[in-house]
Image: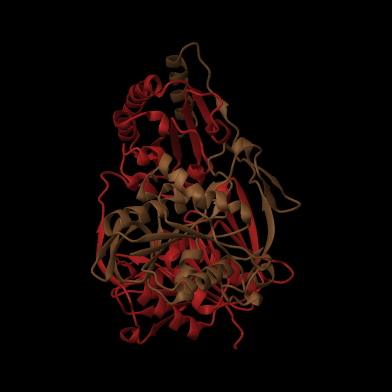
């Protein structure tokens, strides 16, 4: 077996640009590649990659492998898997990175099984053991109550998915040089057992959670659908978006597409206002990247006060209307 | 229709963070006193999904779990919810197995059963959160896989599986038999009924060991693990909370806005 070398990132892009998660992976991959003195490659699968390949080079890729096929969202994971395996044979990387996305979390375990390789999902940090250069993988366990570190010991390449927002993209350097390599894989020959019947995107009104500078989030303490109208009003005044924890979703007060946490969106706004949220680690996993967290809860013992920067003990029904009014006044002037 | 559900016993994930303790030296979590273990919630939702399918299609549900004798309690819980049979895989050789080894031995046990249409697993266990066993099991058995399912419909000899995505969903069609991992969007699992509890208590749970499932011992246990467990720790808290006080909630709220504006948050 050949010596495995370098980092291969399975990238994602839409409308001609690589995704934020892919930029984050390029940063992490670049750091590992520099330490190992090994190249960083990016795989892009799709019809019209636009400027994605150049962008990837500016963000740290040495080589970009382009495979013309339907992108994952329109294709089957089995087919995409077949492509990744073909490209892996050519690149022979020692580390394969995916984002912990709809695509990455589905593909990484299957790829690891096919390559007989170790795999860790949802990592928040990757580093190299200073002595052995084995890949150290840090990931949240027990719902985020603790972090665990694993080291690769196998000779096979390590497969990893990285949690979105676990790193910050580097500033692009347009003077960086790299190679763009079109790959002809026998995509038509890849056997698939399943079939994708439909892909549905649920439109969320207003600002996307991932892009919002301010998020007003509500938990079980909101008590019902009506309370969220109040949170929505505050979000509008602040130019932000509304998020929820698991309870409002389970209770059917709000759609699951707005959930923040381990099983939902991972966000990093400038300001996160947590209203009626107890502060379970499973929820904090999705918002701990916020620059500032403000907690509003009537229970002074609520765990959220351990995890916030500023807190106010009180009923949100009293607090929020004042916040709405005063913010509106102050933001006008 | 014969549905197999793989379930795992874990420490109750709903305990408050203040009760969460670990032994860094031993790299293990100290079980909170007086709080019983539970079936991993996503596995419980997998049982719920299986029950909905059986209610509609008829057939039988078999639960599989790996672990020592104590796991029988969570298998009985699944039976009390309405599953028909439970099988425990137990052997000294299984101890310390990683997800690959667990998937391998579940696969061997399922092959011994032979006749099945659908294998359901929770999307991940709520303790170590690896999220691997279901996918690796599909690979081990060479079966089609759909991850993160919200619902499953039977359509002839195929399954239509609704897979949850971050901003919507996808629908896959896969031939029977298949492996499906189940997400929390399935909704609340049903509670056991009184009759369910009584009938579950009367059922015996067969235990199968490595030899009975013809598993190669060299592929199991801590020795076969692909990753070395290096460290377990509680992350440092990055923030200290300043509580805004006031004579009235209104006064405190006003101060809060002032603080947010002054510190440039808004």
- Which chain is displayed in brown in the rendered image? B
Residue A81: x and y in percent read: 41, 76
Q: Nearer the viewer, residue A46 or B61?
A: B61
A249 sits left or right of B11 in the view? left
At 54% across and 44% down in the image, what residue appears?
A: B13
- Residue B20, placed above or below residue A312: below
Q: Nearer the viewer, residue A4 or B44?
A: B44
**Among the 4 quarters of the image, the one containing residue A157:** bottom right
**Among the 4 quarters of the image, the one containing residue A320:** top left
At 40% across and 24% down in the image, what residue appears?
A: A316
Quadrant of the snapshot with the C terminus of chain A: top left
Quadrant of the snapshot with the N terminus of chain A: bottom right
At 49% across and 36% down in the image, what residue appears?
A: A293
Q: Nearer the viewer, residue A31 or B50?
A: B50
- Which chain is displayed in red in the rendered image? A
| Extreme residue in the top direction | B247
- Residue A283, placed above or below residue A121: above
């Amino acid at each position: 077996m050949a010596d495995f070398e370098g980092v291969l990132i399975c990238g994602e892009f839409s409308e001609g640009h690589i995704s934020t998660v892919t930029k984050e992976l390029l940063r992490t991959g670049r750091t590992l590649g520099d330490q190992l003195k090994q190249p960083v490659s990016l795989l892009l699968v799709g019809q019209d990659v636009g400027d994605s390949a150049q962008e990837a080079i500016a963000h740290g890729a040495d080589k970009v492998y382009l495979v013309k096929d339907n992108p994952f969202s329109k294709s089957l994971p089995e087919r995409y898997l077949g492509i990744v395996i073909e490209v892996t044979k050519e690149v022979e990387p020692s580390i394969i990175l995916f984002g912990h996305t709809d695509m990455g979390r589905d593909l990484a375990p299957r790829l690891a099984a096919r390559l007989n390789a170790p795999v860790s999902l949802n990592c928040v940090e990757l580093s190299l053991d200073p002595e052995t250069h084995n890949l150290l993988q840090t990931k949240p366990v027990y719902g985020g109550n603790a972090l665990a570190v694993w080291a690769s010991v196998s000779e096979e390449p390590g497969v990893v998915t990285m949690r979105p927002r676990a790193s910050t993209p580097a500033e692009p350097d347009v003077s960086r040089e790299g190679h763009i390599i079109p790959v002809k894989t026998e995509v038509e020959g890849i056997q698939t057992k399943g079939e994708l019947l439909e892909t549905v995107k649920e439109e969320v009104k207003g600002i996307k959670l991932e892009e919002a500078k301010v998020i007003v989030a509500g938990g079980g303490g909101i008590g019902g659908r009506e309370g969220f109208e109040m949170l929505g009003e505050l979000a509008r005044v602040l130019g932000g978006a509304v998020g929820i924890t698991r309870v409002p979703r389970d209770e059917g007060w709000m759609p699951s597409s707005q959930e923040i946490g381990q099983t939902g969106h991972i966000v990093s706004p400038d300001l996160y206002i947590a209203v009626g949220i107890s502060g379970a680690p499973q929820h904090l996993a999705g918002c701990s990247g916020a620059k500032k967290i403000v907690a509003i809860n009537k229970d002074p013992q609520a765990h959220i006060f351990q995890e916030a920067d500023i807190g106010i003990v009180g009923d949100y029904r009293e607090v929020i209307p004042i916040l709405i009014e005063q913010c509106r006044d102050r933001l006008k002037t | 229709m014969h549905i197999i559900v793989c379930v795992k016993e874990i420490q109750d994930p709903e305990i408050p963070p203040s009760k969460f303790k670990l032994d860094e030296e031993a790299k293990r979590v100290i079980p909170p006193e007086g709080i019983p273990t539970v079936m991993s919630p996503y596995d419980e939702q997998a049982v719920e999904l299986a029950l909905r399918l059986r209610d509609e299609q008829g057939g039988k549900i078999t639960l599989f779990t790996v672990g020592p004798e104590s796991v029988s309690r969570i298998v009985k819980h699944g039976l009390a919810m309405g599953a028909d049979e439970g099988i425990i895989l137990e052997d000294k050789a299984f101890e310390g197995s990683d997800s690959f080894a667990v998937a391998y031995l579940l696969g061997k046990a399922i092959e011994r059963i032979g006749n099945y249409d659908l294998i359901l697993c929770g999307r991940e266990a709520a303790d170590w959160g690896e999220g691997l066993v279901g996918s690796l099991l599909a690979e081990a058995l060479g079966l089609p896989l759909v991850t993160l399912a919200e619902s499953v419909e039977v359509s002839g000899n195929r399954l239509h599986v609704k897979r949850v995505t971050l901003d919507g969903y996808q629908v896959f069609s896969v031939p029977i038999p298949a492996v499906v991992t189940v997400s929390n969007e399935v909704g609340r699992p049903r509670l056991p009924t009184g009759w369910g509890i009584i009938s579950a208590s009367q059922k015996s749970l067969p235990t199968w060991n490595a030899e009975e499932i013809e598993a190669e011992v060299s592929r199991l246990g801590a020795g076969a693990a692909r990753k070395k467990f290096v460290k377990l720790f509680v992350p440092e808290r990055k923030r200290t909370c300043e509580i805004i006080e006031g004579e009235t909630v209104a006064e405190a709220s006003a101060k809060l806005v002032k603080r947010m504006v002054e510190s440039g948050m808004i």
